[in-house]
Amino acid sequence: MVNINDMRSLVLSHKILLDTSFAMQPGFRGFVQTYASEFRRNPLLVPALVLWELRKHCFSRDNDFLAQRSLVILSSMISLQIAEVRREQCDGFQDLVLLRVALQHKLAHSIVVLTNDSLLMRDLRAMWNCESVTSRKTLEVLKLHRRTQQLCVFRPHSWVSR
Amino acid sequence: MNVHPISEVSFSTASDLSVARTDPQETEAKGSPPAQTLADITTQEAGFQLATHLLQTFTIDYQTWSNRLVSVIPVQSWESL
């Protein structure tokens, strides 16, 4: 589990990127509530594709409640200027956007990716640890625990930190 | 994608969000200090209006939808991170 004070520092010192899978968690509202003050100083970065995907979920039978709630929360955050929407013309697939943006800014910014997608987490960590381009900046991948909805570090069980 | 009319989407009024507040599935982080009241975040009228707008309009495809999104809210490029 991530210590709240540690996370407050992370939010202020890193670029925070949101994935749809994280926004769809029941604990997303609590997460936003807890770190709202920090997001006022360093807004949450929301790919336009996340809004699009939530929008699609709103019309599905399975995830409509959480998607609707998350869309309202993100819309409120955007209105309050504690979240910023980002896009490029070439954006088309959400996981690819996060991988590309993390790689694009690897030398300039430390980054936190909020995702509950294990495949994306593995690809992000592999990309960040590629040997041809090394960086003193750091990448953190965080998720909301499936059962407790507590914020925790998301890493493979076999992960060895470099 | 099946697009339902907005009347079938259930969060267009603030009262619907009160259901969200009592969602039994949600587990809040214990000991989390309330940095800002929940009402400040989730019951912004502007948030409801924007969310409704995002659902009501641009039902074509992602590129068209996101191109039009810039006329509704500020959208920045990733390069200026």
Image (spheres, coloured by chain):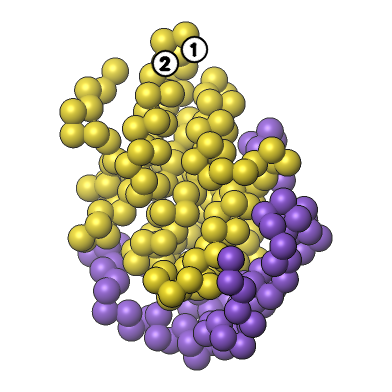
Chain colours: A yellow, B purple
| Occupied quadrant, residue A142 | top left
Q: Nearer the viewer, residue A160 or A136?
A: A160
Q: Identify which residue is drawn at 59% across, 51% down.
A: A49
- The amino acid at mark 2 is Cys
Q: Is residue B80 left or right of residue A103?
A: right
Q: Identify which residue is drawn at 40% across, 54% down.
A: A22
Kindly indicate whether the residue at mark 1 contacts the one at mark 2 (C-beta within 8 angstroms): yes
Q: Identify which residue is drawn at 42% across, 16% down.
A: A130
Q: Nearer the viewer, residue B59 or A66?
A: B59
Secondary structure, mark 1, is loop
Q: Is residue B15 left or right of residue A7?
A: right
| Host chain of mark 1 | A
Residue A159, above or below A84: above
| Mark drawn on residue A130 | 2
Q: Position of residue B27 (x, y in %)?
A: 26, 68
Secondary structure, mark 2, is loop
Q: Position of residue B51 (x, y in %)?
A: 62, 72
Residue A58, above or below A118: below
